[in-house]
Amino acid sequence: MNYWLMKSEPGECSVDDALAAPKATVPWVGVRNYQARNFMRDAMRVGDGVLFYHSSCDQPGIVGIARVASTASPDPTQFDPASPYYDAKSSPEAPRWLLVDVQVLRKIPTITLPALRARPELAELLVLKKGNRLSITPVEPRHWQAITGSGAEAPAKKVRS
């Protein structure tokens, strides 16, 4: 079991947007960093825990608990010239970019960056490291437990309909 922090700009896909989607599940489109892509391709598994994080907004922070709901597959936005995520060097025969589906399990009160920084047990959380701008980062089980209070077990799979 792995744990992840996945950043989304609320204008692109907020936790509320995800909760409103069928089965509270959204494709995590638009990842255009090779390291983040490799996390999805090589390390993410269905059922892994996800801290849903709002970025590039007035109050960045963790806003939901989610899970990885699919294995990695090609991100279709890379092939669409009308998409801001279009990549002319990518083709359906040799896609560069991947996505996973993410299912939001519950919305939580925002845990802001200052609130995360105020907790000494989270000092090594990657999102708090200077210069870290990755949209997907691994989360240590001890950090998952400290943030969710749920221990390092798999997130519950039940979602509101």
Image (tube, rainbow, N blue to C red):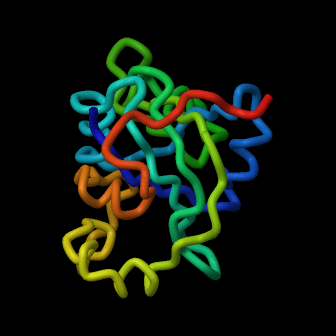
Q: Residue at x 52, y 64 (%)?
A: 62
Which is nearer the eye, 54 or 148?
Answer: 148
Query: In the shown orientation, is residue 71 left or right of residue 138?
Result: right
Residue drawn at x 53%, y 72% is 111
Above or below residue 70? Residue 149 is below
**Who's the residue at 53% across and 39% down the image?**
29
Above/below status of 122 relative to 77? below
**How many numbered callouts?**
0
Query: Residue 87 in the image: x percent, y percent?
Result: 45, 38
Q: Position of residue 98 (x, y in %)?
A: 40, 30
**Quadrant of the rendered structure where residue 137 is?**
bottom left
The front one of 66 and 8 is 66
Q: Pinpoint residue 104: horizontal percent, then vertical percent.
A: 61, 41
Q: Is residue 89 left or right of residue 7?
A: left
Q: Quadrant of residue 34?
A: top left
Image location (x, y in percent) of residue 68: 45, 32
| Residue 66, above or below 136 | above
Q: Quadrant of residue 92?
A: top left
In this view of the protein, which residue sits in the foreground, 12 or 59? 59
* Residue at position x 51%, y 60% in the image: 53
Q: Is residue 127 left or right of residue 20?
A: left
Quadrant location, the C terminus: top right
The quadrant in which the N terminus is found is top left
